[in-house]
Image (cartoon, helix red, strand yellow):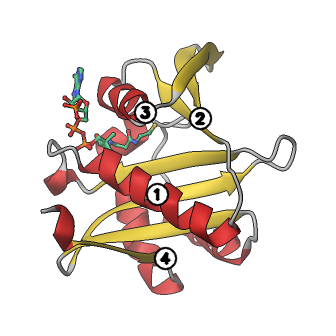
Amino acid sequence: MIRQITCRKATLKDILIYYNWANEATVRKNAIHPEEIRLDDHKVWYIKKMKSSYSDLYFFKMKDKPLGQVRFDKNIHNDRYEIDYSIDFQYRGHGLGQIIIDMAMNKLIAKTKKQIQFEALVKKDNLASSKIFMNLGFSLINELMINDVTFEKYFK
Ligand SMILES: CC(C)(COP(=O)(O)OP(=O)(O)OC[C@H]1O[C@@H](n2cnc3c(N)ncnc32)[C@H](O)[C@@H]1OP(=O)(O)O)[C@@H](O)C(=O)NCCC(=O)NCCS
């Protein structure tokens, strides 16, 4: 299964796949802002991300089918790379989230040719995601409340 996974940089052509992923119910439930995203807003956001030198969007396929995405946003205040990721609904439950994050981190390290510090914000009840970051050697640093919801912050 792992050998069938490929990774490339996301392009403008992926804009609608990203839109559908972003609005999938579990993705919204686990987000800081759980409201549904309007297509117009998504387009503005996506084009900005494509142009930004602080964002790296990696698009994964399983054979020729969209599998998921990992995005890194560089925090200019502390130089850490914040991770956002998701697995397409139909491929969940097979440990693939951990694999795509690992692949994407290696791609980013190879690109920047530097040591990188990563961070991730995980909703406390998102047990699969907490497990994934622990499995990848991240440490739970602290908990924080955002809009009355508890999130965990992981560093590596
Ligand atoms: C988070 C997400 C990528 C995980 O998908 P996945 O890789 O298919 O996850 P899996 O079901 O394989 O579970 C990953 C790990 O969590 C564990 N896990 C899953 N559900 C769990 C639960 N309810 N309680 C405890 N552990 C759980 C699994 O056993 C597995 O651990 P292991 O590899 O050590 O056995 C997927 O649910 C998703 O895309 N969610 C929406 C977006 C999202 O939440 N992104 C993360 C934002 S921080």
At x 63% / y 45%, what residue is drawn? 82
Residue under numbered circle 3: 133
The alpha-carbon separation of the residues under discs 4 and 2 comes to 24 Å
* Lower position in the chain sequence, tag 1 or tag 2: 1
Residue under numbered circle 1: 70
* Lower position in the chain sequence, tag 4 or tag 1: 4
Residue under numbered circle 2: 156
> 144 or 97: nearer the eye?
97
Residues under numbered marks 4 and 3 in contact, where contact means CB atoms less than 8 Å apart: no
Residues under numbered marks 3 and 2 in contact, where contact means CB atoms less than 8 Å apart: yes
Q: Nearer the viewer, mark 3 or mark 2?
A: 2
At x 15% / y 41%, what residue is drawn? 93
| Percent coordinates x, y for residue 89 in the rendering | 21, 52
Q: Is residue 2 above or below residue 117?
A: below
| Percent coordinates x, y for residue 94 in the rendering | 15, 46
* Lower position in the chain sequence, tag 4 or tag 2: 4
Q: Quadrant of residue 47?
A: bottom right
